[in-house]
Image: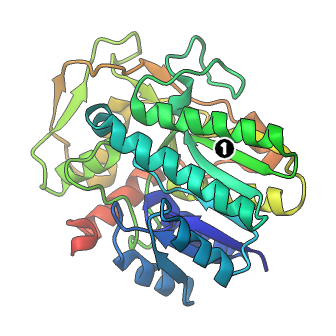
Amino acid sequence: METVLVTGGAGYIGSHTVLDLIKKGFDVIIADDFSNSSKKVISILEKLADRKIKYYELDIRNKEGLREIFKENKIDAVINFAGYKAVGESVEKPLMYYDNNLIGMIVLLEVMEEFSVKKLVFSSSATVYGIPKAIPLVEDNDMGATNPYGRTKLMIEHILVDLAASDNSWEIIALRYFNPLGAHESGEIGEDPNGIPNNLAPYITQVAVGKLEKLSVFGDDYDTPDGTCIRDFIHINDLAAGHSASIKYLVSGKGKGFEAINLGSGKGYSVLEIVANFEKAVGKKIPYVIAGRRAGDIPVSYARIDKAKKLLNWEPTYTIEQMCANSWNWQKKNPNGYKD
């Protein structure tokens, strides 16, 4: 049984991936500093997986602490989710983002190299495509991020490309996510953002549950059917399954060098379509106001996912209705997130 170290494993995407890896027969160790997650998640994961899960409370920039994890465990592969991820915050605090995201990745790579663990799945983002010239977005499109958060992802991808080119024993997959939505069907784990949510779904569910007064829809004058931005939404369980499929691909020896792979649904939904689907799930109207456009927002973004289907034998299985229903189920059961 291969052992996978999951850094940032208590976060939204990390926690769902940990469950999926266990379900697929992998052993998992979590490293998380709990700066953007809750320690409660560990006990919930143990309950859902029906087993103890080894974890370390650690910031991955702590090289000595990271070395201890590799000394104490035989690790076969790593998934790195450890990184700050709010676009707006990255614009206000760029140094914090460059320090945390870039230094964390470099320290992790140095320790992996030291212990000859050279299979890595990196949590990248569709933000690396910048302002696209053509849609759907394909892996060999031009790249260029529009904010510090996106640039940290892009810079890390460049680092990984250079590393794989310098040493052909590295096997690296960068998964470029589109917009994760939904929660585990148990309603026990889900997206629990700090403060005002950056993402659409938790904003809508917090309005529905009465924590926030109304949703702001940024712009209704885009060149789209209803004037609102169109995005590619993917169920969190499908996204998690994409990570397990990537690890399976790497441990089977098929991985060579660096591969970038899109993970999305391959479809676009407008903001107002998402609101309508949430209204169905919740059973009531979601109050919203039209606000001005947000700087840097592009009108349309969705993925082409042929590469994931071909290389990883992966494809999304959940519908937009299920994404919204599962998100609402989590929020309804946990109106204050993990603080309940």
Q: Position of residue 283 (x, y in %)?
A: 25, 52
Give the residue at the far bottom of this rendering: 51
Q: Residue at horizontal 62%, vertical 22%?
A: 136
Q: Is residue 242 above or below residue 276?
A: below
| Residue neighbourhood size for the residue with mark 1, other residues' Cα within 10 Å, grouped as few (<14), some (14–19), many (≥20) | many
* Quadrant housing the C terminus: bottom left
Q: In which quarter of the image is residue 148?
A: top left
Give the residue at the far left of this rendering: 213
Q: Where is residue 328 in the image (x, y as percent from the top left)?
A: 32, 58
Q: What element carries label 1?
A: strand
Q: Where is residue 73 in the image (x, y as percent from the top left)?
A: 68, 81
Q: Which amino acid does label 1 sit on?
A: Ala
Q: In which quarter of the image is residue 96?
A: top left
Q: Residue at horizontal 30%, vertical 31%?
A: 91
Tell which of 287 and 80 is nearer to you. 80
Q: Is residue 224 above or below residue 125?
A: above
